[in-house]
Image: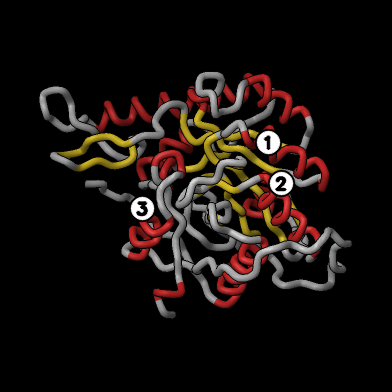
């Protein structure tokens, strides 16, 4: 397969790096399906196609969004409220079936049946626009969704959710809350002019020595446990899933996440989830980008689902990037 046709969705700080940067960085790591951009306007909502009309079966495409905002800077993982609504309208009209993350987890863990054309909507980071602009659309179509929080940002950043909003959204029964981290969604220096994600890197101490394995383990495990406990306390629901910050992970981080009580971990690798997928390296499609269109979003979903049904793909055991 031609690598120019393939893509991985990676993240910069808070998911707001340029698309070009994400693609160039990713092509050196792993080969995945590209997002085409065709068409623009979505047709008015119409009844879904019969369930027998299956574009794909026994697979779920997880659709990753970040912010939903009237202000859409070029090169960011932000979509306008109108674009988000148009994408949801089109998918509902064209016979896609929205499933919740708990239902996706059951599909992964024990093969619980799912409908054809299954998609799952998730949001990273916890922007306030999810409550203000996305929730009314989710409610209108009764679309289940999940939000992966940077927990220390809740109630503390003006552009992020408050705990009151989190509890209110959880109370609808449509939105489930999970975590990325408590306060490790940032880079950490691992050498002269070199850094990586704080959840995978052993940083430099004040004296220039590398952080010990024991110190790294304590730092990351404490953060993951604190994040999970706080979201469970605020929502009254169990938290068993996380997103790896910046999509980076190692066998060590996977083991710590399991120790902290997580069973399902999501990457930023653009692929469909199929039966017997590794629950510690679940794939997603970065659909919520600034120049996306409803037709392009649907085409991207069908592309990765088709590839996943025709060929077997296993995410790498480790994905780490060094930033210079």
In the rendered image, the vertical position of residue 86 relative to residue 185, given as above or below: below
CA gap between label 3 and label 1 equals 27 Å
The local secondary structure at tag 3 comes to loop
- Which residue position holds label 1? 176
Quadrant placement of the N terminus: bottom left
In the rendered image, the vertical position of residue 69 relative to residue 299, given as above or below: above
Of the two numbered discs 3 and 2 on the same chain, state the one appearing first in sequence: 2
Q: Which mark is residue 100?
A: 2
Write the residue at 33% across / 58% down: 25
In this rendering, would 61 be left or right of 188?
right
Disc 1 and disc 2 in contact, CB within 8 angstroms? yes
The colour scheme used to paint the residues is secondary structure
Residue nearer the viewer, 84 or 176:
84
- Which residue position holds label 3? 318
Q: Badge 2, how many Cα within 10 Å: few under 14, some, many 20+?
A: many
State the image coordinates of residue 103 (x, y, percent, origin top left). 71, 48
Write the residue at 34% across / 26% down: 219
Q: Is residue 275 visible?
A: no
The local secondary structure at tag 2 comes to loop
In this rendering, would 294 be left or right of 256?
right
Q: Which mark is residue 242?
A: none
Residue nearer the viewer, 98 or 219:
98
């Amino acid at each position: 397969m031609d690598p120019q046709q393939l893509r991985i969705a990676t993240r910069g700080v808070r998911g707001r790096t340029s698309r070009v940067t994400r693609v160039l960085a990713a092509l050196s790591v792993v080969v995945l399906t590209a997002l085409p951009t065709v068409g623009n306007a979505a047709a008015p909502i119409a009844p879904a196609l019969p369930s027998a009309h299956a574009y794909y079966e026994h697979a779920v495409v997880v659709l990753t969004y970040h912010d939903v905002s009237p202000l859409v800077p070029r090169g960011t993982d932000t979509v306008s409220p109108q674009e988000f609504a148009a994408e949801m309208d089109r998918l509902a009209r064209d016979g896609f079936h929205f499933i919740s993350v708990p239902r996706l987890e059951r599909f992964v863990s024990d093969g619980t049946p799912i409908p054809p054309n299954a998609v799952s909507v998730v949001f990273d980071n916890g922007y306030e626009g999810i409550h203000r602009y996305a929730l009314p659309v989710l409610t209108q179509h009764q679309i289940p969704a999940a939000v992966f929080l940077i927990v220390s940002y809740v109630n503390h950043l003006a552009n992020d959710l408050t705990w009151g909003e989190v509890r209110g959204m959880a109370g609808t029964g449509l939105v489930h809350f999970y975590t990325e981290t408590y306060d490790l969604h940032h880079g950490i220096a691992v050498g002269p002019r070199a850094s990586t994600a704080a959840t995978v890197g052993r940083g430099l101490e004040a004296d220039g020595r590398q952080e010990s394995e024991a110190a790294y383990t304590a730092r990351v495990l404490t953060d993951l446990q604190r994040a999970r406990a706080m979201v469970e306390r605020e929502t009254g629901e169990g938290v068993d899933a996380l997103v790896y910050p910046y999509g980076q992970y190692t066998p060590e981080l996977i083991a710590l996440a399991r120790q902290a009580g997580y069973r399902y971990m999501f990457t930023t690798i653009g692929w469909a989830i199929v039966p017997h997928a590794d629950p510690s390296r679940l794939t997603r499609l970065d659909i919520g980008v600034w120049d996306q269109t409803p037709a392009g979003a649907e085409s991207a979903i069908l592309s990765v689902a088709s590839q996943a049904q025709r060929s077997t793909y296993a995410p790498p055991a480790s994905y780490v990037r060094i930033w210079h």
